[in-house]
Image (spheres, helix red, strand yellow):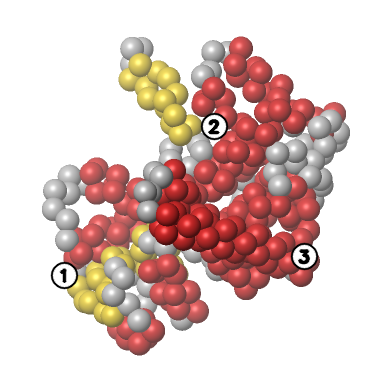
């Protein structure tokens, strides 16, 4: 039985594909999750799908998983594209829930697997650091606007100073957390062996992707981040790569941008790769995106093979996937 859930901050709209379809609403609270699980227990082999909506759906997803239901968490961009393919012209919570359930039925998406407790904690720490950085940038933007009030100016400067200290503390918390957990430490050490990837970038990768060994191949990793190239082809008049899918995790793409800039200068493999891309006529931004994708290939390779980065790996017997 396929079930789609449209998740909002306070409510859950549930559609069970049946004859006829069953629509129910529940509160997005722990009590509401338990009521939903009780409601679903009347059917066998239930497969629940919901969109990735950040913190609004995380607790529900884990609760359903712990209740032994199959659960898939789907990128909203895929649901939107699927809706267009079905010629959906209207949008309500009930229609969205039905669309998600139908997507699950026809597309059979990957099943959700929970992160380990230490990875969940790392994810929270990294998310908090990102929030602090965004707050600091907002205050810096206000400072650049040069407020005329000296009182306001002083308070903005004080707030920026406070946020700087909080950011330093958050980075230290992340470092300590990784050091205290052997698996995170091992994978972080492997990732930071790659020139261009530092501790904070490795933390972003581990927090958002979890254990990289859980992926069957590097294509799954690249697709999850949204760095897989897209192609337009129609007869003989149009056949070219137009960009990246952008259907994955935007925050991780952003986190890989500066490391790619560094890797072009200091990573011997990616420096040569970037030079070849330039000689092939790619624009600077296209080159950086290609390097970001290659960084993911290297990250998956070192973790999958449990071998640190080696610029001469192509000459060795073990090749990175």
- Identify the secondary structure beneath mark 2: helix
Q: Residue at x 67, y 28 (%)?
A: 264
Q: Secondary structure at mark 1?
A: loop
Quadrant the N terminus occupies? bottom left
Query: As displayed, is residue 49 above or below residue 288?
Result: below
Residue matched to label 1 = 20
Which residue is denoted by mark 3 in the rendering? 179
Q: Nearer the viewer, residue 86 or 25?
A: 25
Question: On screen, 60 above or below 273?
Answer: below
Closer to the camera, 167 or 87?
167
Name the residue nearer the viewer: 145 or 177.
Answer: 145
Residue 209 appears left or right of 266: left
- The reply to whether callout 1 and callout 2 are in contact (CB within 8 Å) is no
Q: To which quarter of the image does residue 104 belong? A: bottom left
Q: Which residue is situated farthest in the front direction here?
A: 150
Quadrant containing the C terminus is top right
């Amino acid at each position: 039985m396929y079930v789609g859930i449209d998740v909002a901050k306070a409510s859950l709209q549930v559609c069970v594909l049946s004859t006829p379809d069953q629509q129910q609403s529940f509160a997005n609270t722990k009590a509401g999750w338990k009521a939903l699980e009780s409601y679903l227990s009347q059917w066998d082999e239930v497969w629940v799908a919901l969109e990735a909506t950040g913190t609004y759906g995380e607790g529900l997803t884990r609760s359903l998983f712990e209740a032994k239901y199959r659960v898939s968490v789907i990128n909203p961009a895929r649901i939107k594209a699927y809706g267009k393919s079905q010629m959906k012209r209207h949008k309500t919570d009930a229609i969205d829930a039905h669309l998600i359930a139908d997507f699950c039925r026809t597309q059979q998406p990957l099943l959700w697997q929970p992160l380990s407790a230490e990875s969940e904690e790392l994810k929270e720490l990294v998310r908090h650091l990102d929030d602090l950085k965004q707050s600091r940038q907002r205050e810096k933007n206000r400072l650049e606007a040069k407020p005329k009030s000296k009182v306001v100016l002083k308070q903005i400067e004080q707030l920026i100073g406070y946020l700087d200290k909080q950011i330093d503390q958050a980075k230290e918390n992340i470092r300590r957390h990784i050091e205290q957990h052997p698996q995170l430490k091992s994978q972080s050490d492997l990732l930071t062996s790659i020139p261009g990837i530092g501790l904070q970038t490795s933390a972003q990768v581990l927090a958002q992707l979890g254990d990289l060994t859980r992926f069957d191949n590097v294509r799954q990793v690249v697709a999850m981040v949204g760095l897989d190239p897209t192609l337009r082809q129609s007869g003989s008049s149009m056949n070219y790569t137009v960009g990246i899918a952008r259907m994955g995790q935007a925050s991780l793409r952003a986190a890989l941008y500066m490391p790619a800039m560094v890797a072009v200068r200091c990573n011997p493999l990616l420096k040569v790769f970037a030079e070849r891309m330039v000689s092939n006529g790619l624009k600077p931004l296209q080159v950086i995106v290609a390097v970001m994708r290659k960084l993911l290939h290297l990250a998956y390779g070192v973790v999958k093979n449990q071998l640190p980065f080696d610029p001469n790996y192509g000459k060795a017997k073990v090749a990175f996937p």
